[in-house]
């Protein structure tokens, strides 16, 4: 629980599925995301495991947003332990939420708690994918321009301009809303939160830690002409030192949670959670030394 700016007690934790006697699953959304996005996922996971989602810090206008991933992790870990004082903890992060989940796991381990599994969903590590050399990008653009019809050339140039403006806006701290109507309807304090989260992401460098990870990647990569999405771990390999299970799930980045795509995601998660629980139980069995 947190104290809002008007003296009203607020909570960032939203219960998406309350039933079950297994250790709960905690979900962290992406930038501009909301826990309600994951309600269908929570319900399809079944009645054996409670599922909770976190609102972004500042999303209720209760405080200033946070611009460091490490600080976000400290605050979320404190609230998480208020709901579940002891591990094992099961964390789930989509897009930017994957970064938060990974760092919350680090904070919990530093506090002497056990993390059963971190599920990272379609979350590129900062700097991934690495841009190719300038000459190679220029060649790609020239080839794409020469190979299309006049209308396709105009569309290609417009898409490249929009992409460039989005990247510049992000670097300047503005939120790159693609949909202008959505941007106009977004409250100013939410835009402020989004900008803070982009800043946190852009300055984040994941340090290695030994936690078990389920890494899920959308099977339809972004349509970026000069970028190669050829790493199934999306730039995270050097930071993942525990057991890693990687697989793809249907959809593109923004359609992973569409009703037709969720069943495969649920199947992947249920299998990984059962494995994590079994492995965790085996690790807790004391070793008997021969006399």
Image (cartoon, grey):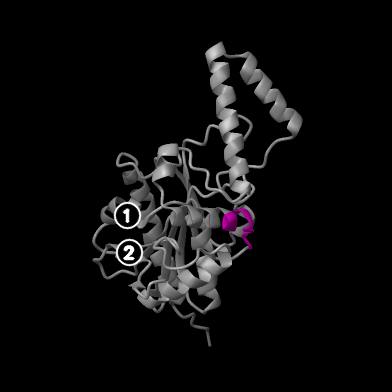
SS at mark 1 in the image? helix
Q: Residue 13, relative to residue 195: is it above or below?
A: below
Give whichever of discs 1 and 2 has the lower sequence position: 2
For the residues marked 1 and 2, what is the alpha-carbon distance in whole angstroms? 8 Å
- Numbered mark located on residue 14 in the image: 2
User: Does residue 256 appear in this view?
Assistant: yes
Q: The N terminus lies in which quarter of the figure?
A: bottom left
Q: Residues within 10 Å of mark 1 (few under 14, many from 20)?
A: some
Name the spot of residue 2 as percent of width and height, x first: 40, 74
Left or right: 127 in relation to 8: right
Q: Which span of residues is magenta-colored? A: 199-207
Q: Which mark is residue 36?
A: 1
Asked if residue 264 lies in the magenta stretch, the reply is no
Q: Looking at the image, which is closer to me, 52 or 280?
A: 52
Q: Nearer the viewer, residue 256 or 177?
A: 177
Q: Can you see residue 84?
A: no
Q: Tag count in the figure?
A: 2
Identify the residue at horizontal 58%, vertical 17% (top origin). Answer: 153
Residue 137 higher or lower than 121, as above or below: above
Q: Residue, x 39% and y 45% (percent of image)?
A: 185
Query: Is residue 204 covered in magenta?
Result: yes
């Amino acid at each position: 629980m947190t104290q809002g700016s008007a003296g009203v007690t607020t909570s960032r934790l939203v219960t998406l599925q309350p039933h079950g006697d297994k250790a709960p699953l905690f979900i962290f959304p992406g930038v501009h995301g909301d826990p309600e996005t994951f309600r269908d996922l929570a319900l399809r996971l079944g009645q054996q495991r409670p599922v909770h989602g976190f609102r972004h810090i500042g999303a209720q206008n209760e405080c200033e947003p946070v611009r460091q991933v490490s600080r976000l992790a400290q605050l979320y870990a404190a609230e998480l332990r208020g709901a579940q004082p002891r591990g094992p903890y099961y964390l789930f992060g989509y897009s930017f939420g994957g970064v938060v989940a990974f760092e919350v796991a680090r904070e919990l381990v530093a506090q002497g708690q056990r993390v059963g599994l971190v599920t990272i969903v379609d979350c590129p590590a900062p700097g991934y994918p690495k841009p190719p050399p300038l000459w190679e990008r220029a060649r790609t653009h020239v080839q794409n321009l020469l190979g299309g019809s006049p209308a396709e050339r105009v569309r290609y140039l417009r898409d490249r301009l929009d992409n460039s403006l989005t990247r510049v806006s992000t670097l300047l701290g503005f939120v790159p809303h693609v949909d202008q109507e959505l941007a106009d309807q977004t409250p100013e304090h939410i835009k402020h939160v989004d900008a803070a989260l982009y800043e946190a992401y852009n300055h984040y460098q994941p340090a290695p830690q030994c936690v078990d990870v389920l890494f899920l990647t959308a099977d339809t990569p972004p349509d970026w002409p000069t970028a190669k999405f050829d790493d199934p771990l999306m730039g995270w390999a050097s930071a993942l030192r525990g057991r890693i299970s990687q697989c793809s799930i249907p959809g593109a980045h923004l359609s992973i949670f569409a009703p037709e795509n969720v069943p495969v995601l649920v199947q992947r998660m249920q299998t990984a959670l059962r494995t994590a629980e079994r492995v965790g139980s085996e690790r807790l069995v004391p070793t008997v030394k021969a006399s």
